[in-house]
Amino acid sequence: MDKKAVLLVNLGTPDKPVSSSIRPYLKQFLSDRRVIDLPRWKWMPILHGFILPSRSKRNESVYQQIWTDEGSPLLYYSMKQREALEEKILDKNTRISLAMNYRTPSISDELEKLHKWGVRKLIILPLFPQYSSTTTASVWDHVTKEISKWRDIPEVVFLRDFANHPLWIELLKKRIEDGAKAYGKPDVILLSYHGIPKRYTSGGDDYPYRCHTTAQALKDRMPGINFMISYQSKFGQEPWLEPSTSEILIDLARTDVKNVHVISPCFTADCLETLEELAHENKQLFLDNGGESYHYLSAANDDPLFIDCLADIIKGYLHPTA
C-alpha cells in the first residue's frame, strides 16, 4: 500500500527559556518575509541592531514564567496532539509527524525523515485555525522549498485552515460553557485573535474574514451570548488590525462590565501569547481599570475533542471514497 503521512505544523518556540535560545528563534521568525515584509536593507539593521538584543533578554523572564517541567507549553501540547492523533489513526501505512515552522523539530528534518521512509501521499496540516499569509502561507513556503529538492515528489495535500469546522466550533463552545460553570456567567466573552498589520489585509490576506468566520459560527451556536472580537500582540509602529485587546479591556473595565472571559480562537496550544499576554498581562490591565473578574479560557491543547477535529479534517484525504 502507498505510504501516507500527515505533517502537523505549529509556529515554533525557543528550545530553552534563556536569551541564548530565544535569540535564534526570534531571528528565524522575524527574518521571515511573510512575517516582516519590509525591504531587507531597511529591516535587517533594525532586527540585528535593536530588536534581537533587547527582546531576547527581555523575553527571558516571561518565558521562564510560562515554562513547565516538560518544557515549552506550545511544543509539549503539540507533541501530545501528534501522539493522540497517531493513536486515533492506528494505521501502519500512515505516519503522523510534527514540525515547527521555526526552530525544532524543523520542517526540513521531518520532511527528510518522511522522504527516506518513502511517503507517497503527504498531507500538510498547519495548526492555525484561520489562514494568514504570516502563518499558513509561511508553512507553505517552507514545505515547498524542501520538497522542490526531491526528484520523487509525492502527492501533496495542503490544508488551508479549519476556521468553521464543526468540531473546532464545538470545542470553543465547550470551553466557554465550562468557563461559565467554573467562574460564573460573564458579562462579555472576548474573542482575542493574534493581530497582523492592516497593510497585509489590503494586499489580499483574508485573515480578518477567517477570524469573523469562526466568530460567526460560534455566535450561531451560542445565541444570546455577548461576544466581542479584538486583536492582540501588536508589533512595531504601523497600524494593525483593530480593535486592540488591551484597549477593549480598558474600555470595558471603565464601564459597567465587571466580569469578562477571554478566549483566543486562533491558538491550538497555549503559548507565550496566551499564558503571559492574555492570562496575566491583560488580566492585570482589566483589574487595574475597574474590572472585578477576569478569566482566560485555555487553548485546545490535548483536549480529545480537538483530536477528533484533526482526525475528521484529514479522514477524507487518508481514505477517499471511491
Image (tube, rainbow, N blue to C red):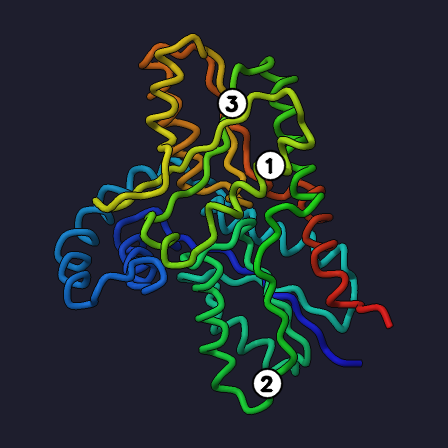
Residue name at image x 40 percent, y 41 percent:
272
At 29% from the left and 38% from the top, the residue drawn is 61
User: Where in the figure is residue 67, as x and y percent of width and height?
Assistant: 42, 41
Frontmost residue, 188 versus 103: 188
> Which amino acid lies under the numbered mark 3 shown in the image of this protein?
His
Q: Secondary structure at mark 2?
A: loop
Q: Position of residue 41 (x, y in %)?
A: 15, 68
| 192 displayed left or right of 239 | right
Query: What amino acid type is highlighted by mark number 1?
Result: Gln
Q: Earlier in the sequence, mark 3 or mark 1?
A: 1
Point out which mark residue 216 bears: 1
Q: Nearer the viewer, residue 235 or 280?
A: 235
Q: Quick check: 115 left or right of 247?
A: right
Rendered image quadrant of residue 95? bottom right
Q: Is residue 1 left or right of residue 128?
A: right
CA distance separating discs 2 and 1: 39 Å
Report the disc number at residue 261. 3
Q: Residues within 10 Å of mark 1 (few under 14, many from 20)?
A: some
